[in-house]
Amino acid sequence: LAPTTATPPPAIGALYRLGGLATDRAMIAACPYAWPWNVLGWPGVNVPAGFVGALPVGAQLLGPANSELLLVSLAAQLEAELRWHERWPPQKKDAAGTAA
C-alpha cells in the first residue's frame, strides 16, 4: 500500500512548456511510489482514498509479479465496501454560506 502521488496534482498547464526529460523528472517527483513498479513491470492498482480539499486522492495497492488477480479482487472488495462512487468532494461555500 502506497500513496498514488506525493503531492497534490500540478496546476493545469504547469508542465506545458517542459521538454521530455524535465517532464519525466516532474512526473517522477510527483509520483515517486509508482515509477519503480512501472519500470519493473509489477502490478499495481489505484483506488480512491479520499479528498484533499476538492481534489480526489488515491492509494496504490502494489504487488509482486503475477499478483494481478489478487490486487483486482482486493480493489473490487474495497469498492463494494467503501462505495466511493457515492462520495463527492466538499463544496465551497460563498459569502452567504450557500454551496457555490
Image: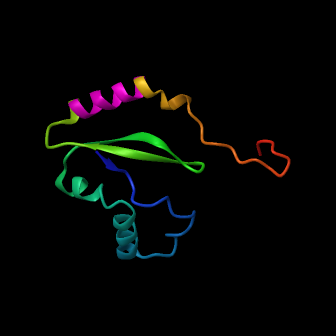
Tell me if residue 88 is in the magenta stretch. Answer: no
Q: Please tell me whether residue 6 is drawn above or below residue 75 in the rendered image.
A: below
Residue 85 pos. (x, y %): 52, 30
Magenta segment main secondary structure: helix
Residue 80 pos. (x, y %): 41, 23
90 and 13: which is toward the camera: 90
The stretch in magenta equals: 70-80
Q: Quadrant of the N terminus?
A: top left
Residue 39 pos. (x, y %): 21, 57
Q: Please tell me whether residue 100 is drawn above or below residue 25 in the rendered image.
A: above
Q: Residue at x 35, y 71 (%)?
A: 25
In this rendering, would 84 be left or right of 98?
Answer: left
Q: Residue furthest left?
A: 65
In this rendering, would 70 be left or right of 15?
Answer: left
In this rendering, would 56 be left or right of 98?
Answer: left
Q: Residue at x 44, y 40 (%)?
A: 48
18 and 1: which is toward the camera: 1
